Image (tube, grey):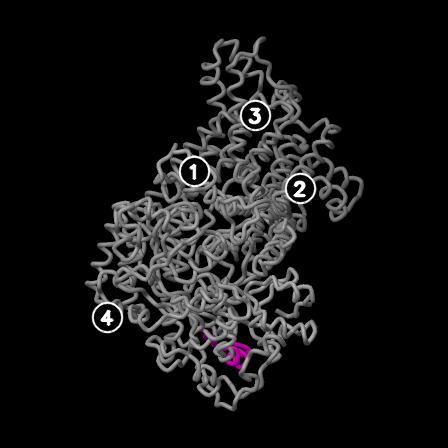
Amino acid sequence: MADQARPRLQDLMGSSAQAAEGGAPPARKANRRKRLVPYGLAAPSVLWLLVFFLIPTLYMAFISLGSGFLGNIKFGTNFSNYVEVLKTYDKQFIRSVIYALIVTFLALCIAYPLAYWIALYGGRRKNVFILLILLPFFVSFVIRTVQWQFILADTGIIFGPLKNLGLLSKNFHVLSTPVAVIAGITYNFLPFTVLPLYVALERLDPRLLEAGRDLYANKVTTFLKVVWPLSLPGVFAAFLLTFVPAVGDFVNSQILGGPKTTMIGQIIQTLFQTNFDYPHGAALSFILMAFLLIGASLYAKVLGTEAVTSAAAR
Amino acid sequence: MTDHPNIDPAWLRGMTMRRMSRRDLFKAGGVGASALSLGAILAACSSSDSSSPAASGSSGGVDFTAEPAGTLDFANWPLYIDKEKVNGEVVRPSLLQFTDQTGIEVNYREVIQGNNTFFGKIQPQLAAGQSTGWDLIVITNGETLTRLMTLDYLVELPTDMRPNFDKYADVSVKDPAYDPGNKFTMAWQSGLTGIAWDPKQVAELRPDNPTITSMNDLFDPAFAGKVGMFGDNADMPNLTLLGMGIDPTTSTPEDWNAAAEKLIAQRDDGIVRQYYEQNYINAISNGDVAVTMGWSGDIFQTNLSGDSEGLQFAVPDEGAIIWTDNMMIPKGAAHPVDAMMYMDYVYDPDVAGQMAQWINYITPVPDSKAFVLGLFDDTGDEYYKNVAESPLVYPTPADTAKLSTYRVLTEDEQLEWNGIFQPIYQS
Amino acid sequence: MSAVAVETAGTASADQAPIRRGKGRRWTSYILPTYTWVVIVYLAFPIAVMIVFGFNDVPGRVSARWYGFTTQWYTQLFDNTELTAAFKNSIGIAVISSAVSTLIGALLGLALGRYRFKGAPSTNYLVFLAIASPEIVLGTSLLTMFVNAYTFIPQGFPTILVSHIAFSISFVAVTVRARVQGLSSSYEEAAQDLGADPLNTFRLVTLPLIMPSVISGFLLAFALSVDDFVITSFVAGPTVTFPLYVAGAAKQGIPPQVNVMGTILFSVGVLAAISSAVAPAIASRRDAKRLSQDRELTASLTASVGSKG
């Protein structure tokens, strides 16, 4: 995550000449050799993705139906693995979804006014603001989280002085509570929320806003009738881009959490790395992936299929 | 550690290293400060000659009569060997001396951060009959060690290549229950699992009784939200059982469930602040917890480093757990002879003393106390006296009487045990 | 896009003038800017703490107490062998994996953006899946494959490398694809009409045109790799990278050098971002067609922001 800012910023600012919306025209001379060109271009990547993405995922699917320990898996059809993990870890699964929903809601609430102001009133300094928003990405994800652990310590740089002044009770703490976990995830993924909102709002035609103001003569109505509906795709994108990594996160709950804040990612990690119970870990991973991919695919279908499969669609 | 540090004479005069033996440094001043002098210094205080391995039979397909290869790849835990800073360079004196005596270069890496996680990293190689890349690893007695032995992943150690061990090892690490006859392991250091506490906070939270003496203190509502527990399958369950007056080594599943009930109540009543790994040290030095399960040597080191002041370690009235981290040679090791020589080398009382005064856990060589006291005599530094007199480094027989060990579990029992205790801290 | 839109695009560019509000500035007009700055301070706060505490003269581990100012952690940056090894591993893996994934990912982006071919829809979907899958799932599935019942695959530097390449390819591909889709193919056609063979057309025309996105892709891949924790933690075997080291150290006490290395990475990242953002901005002053945000670009960028967590 560190420095996605660089390319994104560059591309956001960069000179992307607007092409005909029609996209790629067919190759002009349809000889056989030419038809093979795209396959040749795509082959190395596709092969790599097959071997190191698709096949492992399918292999994990087999494993999730097996039984055994570490590499010594007996393959089988133990669909009961899925039932068992859902039964055993239902609390953590539900908790992860709830945390992620809260995080996404908070992040949207925090990010929307920010994105709105930068996009519409940022002027020349828009990109400076976006760079500032992306600052956290220039520091490792793990380090950022560790810094929060350090900042939020009971007698740390914030609560220490407050407690010494008697403004907080000695027992007050944020670390080891759901509040710390949710705050940590919100902090870590907030830029993911801001960017899609910003991109959506930045593309609004200022004339539409003026027209809206002329029509409704009221900023609130203009916002509700013009800005909000037009920014909805951005809101959905922001939702997805915050929610997916938030559900699967295990770093924040591990570093900032306490008893009863365990999230599903931690369980998966324990099953694989402490218990070496690959079948159950695989089953749980699969459930998580299915849950998230169904959501993501729905999103892609409804709002942005062409964003992903544009070349194919035409 | 491939290069000997180039030791600056100014350093030798400066004597700024609190933990270096000044006696030896003066000697070195006499010989001149050559690049090899630190090794020479340390060699001067070593009484054993472990450089020529005695003839011995081969074991487990490993030929221990072979000449040492001159290299040793050693995986250990962080902060677990003596270390000094010389001219801005970090050196490990006991390793330098070993190299000096034997010509074996030690590639010492602090890569082990958990028994289970480390096992997960080397298991694929072991299962495939490949080298793990390590000649010597350090694993705590318990689930992982049992697994390594039952899966036949360890090299059987020759009994005729450990004169120092035979002569100087404490009875407690000879022929231990988890490895009868020291077939596969030799102790590195031992430690206690007991209670670490911060007197300042305890006095504030429970003014009428400001001392921690019992396991019950971990369950006292006066410390609600300020109690740390280990989040693991070894220390948390075993110490809790001990606190309930049950000997963990002979405990039954009924006992386990009773302990679990107690632990769940403790968690649900909001007494537990968090389940920790070794980060409990940060928590207690930051003031996040007032009382926590802890390991003996950590508290000593934390106070010493200046990160915190006056933290205490209590062996509860009900007893504490003693565990042992063990050296062992994983199958496929490229340099087993070198590893074996090193394992015996650390049982030299002076070497053990040099390590013990830094590590501050329980040394397996009681005779090393003389070396540490010698440092006190030479330097007048109270620190060495404290180490030599600390029951946490050199426990008295009265202390050891209160100690228990981990329950040794079969694979099936382990599953049941984990199933009972894991959900408590992963909730 | 309509003529109106193209016209307004002129004001919607990077250096667009702010929308004019009414005549007087009421106090309410300060709410949003103030709020923005508050959030920025919140986002930057942990970074400031990291930088400041890199100068803390602590005796041992990172501590909340201030012991006085020192630069010793900068001079002793490489004292900690394990930390240094981890840092080197991270840089090495990032360099190699971003180079490889940029090379083959850019070709895929080119194929998807420029050509219509059988299998393109499923390839696009594959790329989408790779981006949208939660990291922990990618990590665990790679782990199960590496620790399998059939053959022995030693985990370590090589497995981290192939895994990083695997998750970087998609990000490079969508970045390049977006750029290619935004380009007219008329330049290439012109080149071919002038008799250039396909290879020369690619080398002299296509490559320079897509270069900005290739560089973006490379930087993105590098950033993703150097910071990846979740996937790496499953496939690393005994090898330690910088994020893995920090996560491990968090359990024992963090050496102060971690703050310093974090500060250095941060500074280098910010400099790279500024230079890569400023250069095209300056160049684009001369570029009349710089204006509108390509929809595909936007979409793929938002997609690439996602999934990494």
Q: CA distance from mark 1 to mark 4?
A: 46 Å
| Left-right relation of C73 to B360 | right
Residue at image location 46% in from the left, 88% down from the top: B160
Asked if badges 2 and 1 are on one and the same chain, I answer no
Identity, as a three-letter code, of the amino acid under mark 3: Ile
Which corner quadrant of the image does residue B71 belong to? bottom right
Camera-side residue of A225 and B200: B200
Determine which residue is flagged by label 1: A159
Decide: is B211 above or below C7: below
Which dot marks residue C270?
Answer: none
Q: Residues within 10 Å of mark 3 (few under 14, many from 20)?
A: many
Say which of B36 and C274 sits in front. Answer: B36
Do the residues at pointers 4 and 2 share their chain?
no
Residue B182 image-quadrant placement: bottom left
Category of crowding for the residue at label 2, using alpha-carbon neighbours closer than 10 angstroms: few (below 14), some (14–19), many (at least 20):
some
Q: Which residues are magenta?
A: B327-343
Please state which amino acid type lies under the numbered disc 4. Thr
**Lower sequence index among marks 1 and 3:** 3
Q: Choose mark 4 or mark 2, whichever is in front.
A: 4
Of circles 2 and 1, which is in front?
1
Q: Label 1 is placed on what type of residue?
A: Phe
Residue topped by disc 2? C272
